[in-house]
Image: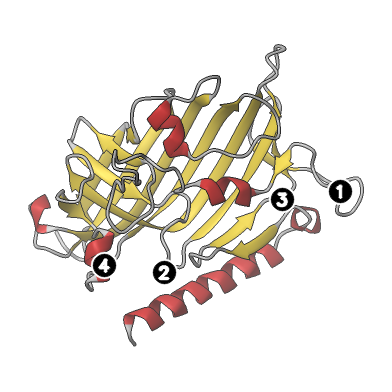
């Protein structure tokens, strides 16, 4: 089977599985769900009526008093996803600088302790891989009479295209795990992780358009910013020879940000750990 056909087959298989999962949910939960497919081919499952508990801030599903009545605190997940990857980072020549060739501008990750960088498609922005995004966006007043809004985003991503490099992610970076998009376009195999990101953002007022995370980090936008971000990703794929093993050895990648609290300076996130290891084959000593 040719690679494009394989990707398409995998994608539709995952979509059917996701829809079967939705069908197995309790009736009250199903009222909180909607799904659609983006132009990039990403399956997005919006938790519709989901909101964050005011005490625990854990996402829950509100039982609606009237069928179809919207949750006043809920905003469509598409509003957040649609603006990710759209921020224009000026290149000084009237155009937009592209951080990593072959993909939209997005936050990348860096672990100073291991000198490793990583790309994880945390918002389903890279087309062609059958990525599934499940999540919710909740907006409420910040409180304290500030007039500002607090945006809480919860994102779960399956099949997020991922690669890890030595040093910061750049066009010339030495790859340790997976393959960058430019190599995949030339026929190399992709590697994936499943990820979970929780984001707490402050905006100047309720109801404003959503903001690209890259803009928050690049500009440190006044009167708004990132209150906190927690992130984790894990998956298996191919280790590269630069990691010190035979090229193509099966490996595992794990990324963790326990709780980040910063809102300016860079589109690269410092992480608690980017861990790579060889996956031992069954029967191997």
- Mark 3 highlights which residue? 48
Q: For the view shown, which residue lies furthest in the bottom direction?
A: 1
Upstream in the sequence, badge 3 or badge 4?
3
Spot occupied by residue 103 in the image (x, y as percentages of width and height):
35, 56
Upstream in the sequence, badge 3 or badge 2?
3
Which residue does the image show at 44% across and 23% down from the upper left?
261
- Is residue 98 toward the left or the right of residue 86 in the image? left
- Is residue 42 toward the left or the right of residue 97 in the image? right
Which of the pair 112/218 is nearer the observer?
A: 218
Q: For the view shown, which residue lies furthest in the right direction?
A: 66
- Mark 4 highlights which residue? 184
- Mark 2 highlights which residue? 128
Crowding near the residue tagged with mark 2, few <14, some 14–19, many ≥20 C-alpha atoms within 10 Å: some
Q: Nearer the viewer, mark 3 or mark 2?
A: 2
Point out which mark residue 16 bears. Answer: none
Q: Nearer the viewer, mark 3 or mark 4?
A: 4
| Residue 282 visible in image | no
Spot occupied by residue 31 in the image (x, y as percentages of width and height):
79, 55
Crowding near the residue tagged with mark 3, few <14, some 14–19, many ≥20 C-alpha atoms within 10 Å: many
């Amino acid at each position: 089977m040719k690679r494009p056909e394989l990707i398409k087959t995998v994608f539709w298989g995952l979509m059917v599985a996701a829809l079967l999962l939705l069908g197995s949910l309790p009736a009250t939960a199903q009222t909180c769900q909607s799904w659609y497919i983006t132009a990039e081919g990403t399956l997005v499952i919006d938790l519709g009526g989901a909101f964050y508990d005011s005490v625990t801030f854990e996402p829950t599903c509100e039982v609606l008093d009237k069928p179809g009545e919207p949750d006043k605190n809920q905003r469509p997940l598409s509003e957040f996803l649609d603006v990710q990857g759209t921020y224009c980072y000026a290149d000084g020549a009237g155009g937009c600088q592209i951080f990593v060739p072959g993909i939209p501008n997005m936050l990348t990750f860096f672990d100073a302790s291991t000198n490793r960088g990583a790309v994880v498609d945390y918002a389903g922005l890279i087309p062609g891989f059958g990525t599934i995004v499940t999540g919710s966006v909740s907006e409420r007043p910040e409180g304290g009479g500030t007039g500002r809004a607090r945006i809480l985003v919860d994102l779960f991503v399956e099949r997020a295209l991922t690669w890890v490099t030595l040093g910061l992610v750049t066009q010339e970076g030495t790859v340790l795990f997976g393959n960058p998009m430019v190599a995949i376009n030339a026929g190399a195999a992709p590697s994936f992780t499943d990820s979970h990101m929780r984001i707490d953002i402050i905006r100047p007022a309720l109801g404003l358009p959503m903001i690209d995370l890259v803009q928050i980090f690049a500009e440190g936008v006044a009167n708004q910013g990132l209150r906190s971000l927690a992130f984790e990703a894990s998956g298996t794929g191919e280790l590269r020879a630069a990691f010190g093993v035979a090229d193509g050895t099966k490996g595992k990648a794990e990324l963790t940000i326990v709780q980040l609290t910063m809102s300016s300076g860079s589109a690269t996130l410092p992480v608690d750990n980017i861990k790579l290891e060889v996956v031992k084959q069954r029967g191997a000593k």
